[in-house]
Amino acid sequence: MRKAKIFAGIGILLFAALYYYIELPAINIHARGLWSFLITLVVILLVLYVIRGIRKRTFFLGNLTETRQQIKSSKVLSLGITAVLVLVVVYLIGSVLSSPIVNASKYQKLLEVSEGDFAKDVQEMSFSQIPLLDRDSATLLGNRKMGSLVEMVSQYEVDSIYTQINYQNRPVRVSPLKYANLIKWFTNSKEGIPAFIMIDMATQNTSLVRLDEGIKYSTSDHFGRNIYRHLRFSYPTYIFQDLSFEIDEEGTPYWICPVSEFKIGLFGGETVGRVVTCNAITGETKDYAVEDCPQWVDRAYSADLLVSHYNYYGTLKHGFFNSVLGQKDCLQTTEGYNYLAIDDDIWVYTGVTSVSGDQSNVGFVLMNQRTKEAKYYKVEGATETSAMASAEGEVQNLKYQATFPLLLNIGDQPTYFMALKDDAGLVKKYAMVNVQKYQWVAIGNTVDECIADYQDLLLSNGIVEKELPPVKDTYTAEGKIASITEVVVEGNTHYFIILEGDDNIYDVLVSEHIDIIRSSVGSDISFEYNEGDSTREVINLN
């Protein structure tokens, strides 16, 4: 009898350990997974106890009525059932008392929103800082890049994470590779994952960044090197939100792991209280209060969390029932969001409209993914979906589809900017739509062409009094000419130059820079240039 109890106890402990190892619930009363774990464990113990009693004929004493009476009289069963009921009741009561129904004012204050000045805060920026691609296009480029690497494609795939970050003042998306399957993990895990994908969202350049030492902690690793298990065993009480993959300014890969904090009751008012960074190569972790998060970290707060907090802020001003019934002064975000890189941070952009679902925005909001700073801008105009439809209408014969737009400042005019893609998901054209007069649409095959047409549109309609300067960054270059080629483009003579040790192609329009004809291979040269889609346009010879 004693051995049987010992074996039964060991079996229960093994089951609990296996369940914990697989499900990884946080040992925290705010974690819903812990409550599910406890309820499931008690129920299984009760079932095993009943089965054991029946097998030993403890309960089965002649007929069904007597068996039921024996079960009801069992103190163990009564205690177990009571425990399950208490757990379920506490869980349900905690859920209700944590909900917006009884805590509307607390939910409404989860996000502090300040009023912003559009012309001042959303300054005109270079298109080298604007992400021209959406996530789907970035995924397509990443998969194509991976497919071209014959030596890797048989062993690895690209993870679907594609986190958008600022890297050395450039908007990029990064995503690690992952093992193609369990066998590929078994044969390659010793060296680790050798690289990650980086996509420049402005230039569309896609590169495979090889690492000196492989990534040892990832979502596709197993046992103790699985990133979720590694984090759970390091921080058993932390409730982690969705992880993101980022790189620091030196290019070292990290997992950014936001830790949930609950401001309202048992399960309500979820926000971020701490951030854990995990070196993806070594597994070293560092724990920060969210306000002390390193500057290079771009995503402490997820876009979905920030959007949900703004919706609480906009709909619960006069209580929960007003948000459902009267809906006085209720505002909500539009369906969709995008990202802007501003001052080395990533800001979530989304429009704000009334809950009645009309086709106009009353403004828009920018929310910082590192600091949670939120700014509202009162700019009335068309919703993003209306602007997308307007742009698609300009090319309806081509059946292109518009991406969710960004809101830009062009000549102090709030302007939607979006890409137009074909059925294969490839970007074919770009569009700009005036927010307040969304029938004003400019279409271009390139970004430069699109913005030039839009600026002409503003000038012809009297919105601006003079031609706007191009929104571009200016760079300098110098060195010896390694190659110089004369090319005639649309009747104009250009010199295409390559410098020694520099793979870029620089385009010099001879009619504007006549002194270039004095240069030849080996000549020293210095100049200023703007970045184009495939070449660098020289604007000033020094």
Image (tube, grey):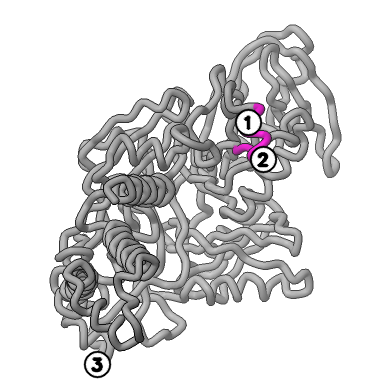
Q: Is residue 205 visible?
A: no
Disc 2: which residue = 180
Q: Which residues are magenta?
A: 178-187
Left or right? Give the position of 530 relative to 309: right
Where is residue 51 shown, x and y percent of the image? 38, 67
Crowding near pointer 2: few (<14 within 10 Å), some, many (20+)?
Answer: some
Residue at the (20%, 80%) spot, across then down: 101
Where is residue 448 shown, x and y percent of the image? 63, 49
Crowding near pointer 1: few (<14 within 10 Å), some, many (20+)?
Answer: few
Tell us which disc is closer to us: 3 or 2: 2
Where is residue 406 shown, x and y percent of the image? 49, 59
Disc 3 versus disc 2: distance between alpha carbons?
53 Å
- Toward the viewer: 345 or 455? 345
Disc 2 versus disc 1: distance between alpha carbons?
11 Å
Disc 3: which residue = 326
Q: Is residue 432 visible?
A: yes
> Is residue 419 depicted above or below 104 in this figure?
above
Residue at the (67%, 18%) spot, across then down: 502
Left or right? Give the position of 65 relative to 493: left
